[in-house]
Image (cartoon, rainbow, N blue to C red):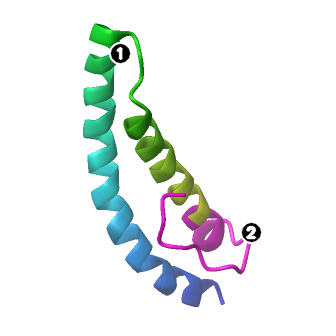
């Protein structure tokens, strides 16, 4: 079963690798927004937190073998 989970996690890992690059740039943009406005833009915050949650769900499914529920393709 662990091998099957790793194979099923590959599409998630491909999508998450692209989203992680986007999240990095979102954090850089948010840093400048915080610097100039003093506020973290809600959309950028939701995106970065969503990517982190998705990573955690995929790790729990494939690496930690905590759950058998296949993680959804969503940031929520």
What residue is pinned by disc 2?
Answer: 66
Q: Is residue 7 left or right of residue 11?
A: right
Residue for point 38% across, 28% down? 41
Stretch of the chain drawn in magenta: 58-76
**Between 20 and 73, the one nearer to me in the picture:** 73
| Number of residues whose C-alpha sits closer than 10 Å to that of mark 1, classed few (under 14), some (14–19) or many (20 or more) | few
Image x and y of residue 65, in percent:
70, 72
Image x and y of residue 62, in percent:
59, 73
48 in magenta: no
Q: Is residue 71 left or right of residue 66?
A: left
Which label's residue is closer to the chain start, 1 or 2?
1
Image x and y of residue 1, in percent:
66, 90
Residue for point 56% across, 52% down? 53
What residue is pinned by disc 1?
Answer: 34
Residue for point 34% across, 44% down? 23
Q: Find residue 63 and report its image quarter.
A: bottom right
Q: Disc 1 vs disc 2: Cβ atoms closer than 8 Å?
A: no
Q: CA distance from mark 1 to mark 2?
A: 37 Å
Residue for point 50% across, 85% down? 8
71 in magenta: yes
**Between 19 and 30, the one nearer to me in the picture:** 30
Image x and y of residue 75, in percent:
48, 58
């Amino acid at each position: 079963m662990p091998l099957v989970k790793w194979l099923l996690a590959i599409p998630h890992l491909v999508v998450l690798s692209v989203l992680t690059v986007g999240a990095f740039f979102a954090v850089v943009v948010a840093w400048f927004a915080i610097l100039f406005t003093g506020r973290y833009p809600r959309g950028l915050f939701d995106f970065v937190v969503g990517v982190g949650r998705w990573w955690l769900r995929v790790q729990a499914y494939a690496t930690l073998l905590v759950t058998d529920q296949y993680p959804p393709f969503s940031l929520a």
